[in-house]
């Protein structure tokens, strides 16, 4: 059995910035985001891919950062919740989550917002069934899912109004 030890220098594109980082081969993307880059918006939930709290976008697709080795993430664009909006302006999705009361403790919110953003990028008018499918695997123990689904529908309506 070969044991891998020692840090490796990797390049990561996160929120539009290029980072050179020394990481242990077994470090997850979640650990690197939170511990080396201070991007704590990506939450450390279950650590086993069950809760969705660590969701990031990789080339626009939702992925669970706790299940990814950082060294395997060098050829993609990673977006965390910190990189979703520009400056202090919230996105339509973030505004809708606030307006619908879909944010309480905030632990699941970053993952839900990123998954919703990915959904609405691909499908600006999802059905309730499609919303539920896109958010499956994201656990919320505070707001209940009705407010979250309402927030997704409101964001969809806002985005559709802005396009037409």
Image (cartoon, rainbow, N blue to C red):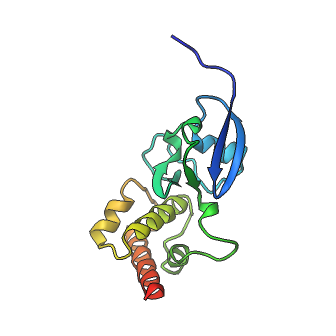
Residue 49: horizontal and vertical position, in percent?
Answer: 45, 44
- Outermost residue toward the top in this view: 1
Observer-nearest residue: 11 or 68?
11
Q: Residue at x 44, y 66 (%)?
A: 116
Observer-nearest residue: 74 or 45?
74
Residue 148: horizontal and vertical position, in percent?
Answer: 43, 70
Give above or below for 36 relative to 161: above
Give above or below for 103 relative to 57: below
Residue 118: horizontal and vertical position, in percent?
Answer: 45, 63
Numbered disc total: 0
Residue 129: horizontal and vertical position, in percent?
Answer: 27, 68
Residue 71 visible, this orientation:
yes
Q: Residue at x 54, y 13 (%)?
A: 2
Q: Is residue 19 left or right of residue 31?
A: right
User: For the C terminus, which image quadrant?
Assistant: bottom left
Q: Residue at x 69, y 43 (%)?
A: 35
Q: Residue at x 44, y 76 (%)?
A: 151
Give above or below for 24 relative to 136: above
Residue 144 visible, this orientation:
no
Observer-nearest residue: 32 or 107?
32
- Outermost residue toward the front in this view: 75
Q: Is residue 125 left or right of residue 21?
A: left
């Amino acid at each position: 059995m070969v044991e891998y030890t020692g840090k490796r220098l990797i390049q990561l594109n996160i929120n539009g910035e290029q980072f050179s980082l020394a990481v242990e081969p077994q470090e997850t993307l979640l650990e690197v985001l939170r511990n080396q880059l201070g991007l704590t918006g990506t939450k450390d939930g279950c650590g086993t891919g069950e809760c969705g709290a660590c969701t990031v976008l990789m080339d626009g697709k939702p992925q669970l950062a706790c299940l990814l080795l950082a060294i395997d993430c060098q050829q993609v664009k990673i977006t965390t919740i910190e990189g979703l909006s520009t400056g202090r302006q919230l996105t339509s999705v973030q505004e809708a989550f606030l307006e619908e009361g879909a944010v309480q403790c905030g632990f699941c919110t970053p993952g839900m917002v990123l998954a919703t953003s990915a959904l609405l990028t691909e499908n600006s008018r999802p059905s309730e069934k499609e919303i539920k499918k896109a958010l499956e695997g994201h656990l919320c123990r505070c707001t209940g899912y009705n407010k979250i689904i309402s927030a997704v529908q409101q964001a969809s309506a806002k985005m559709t109004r802005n396009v037409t």
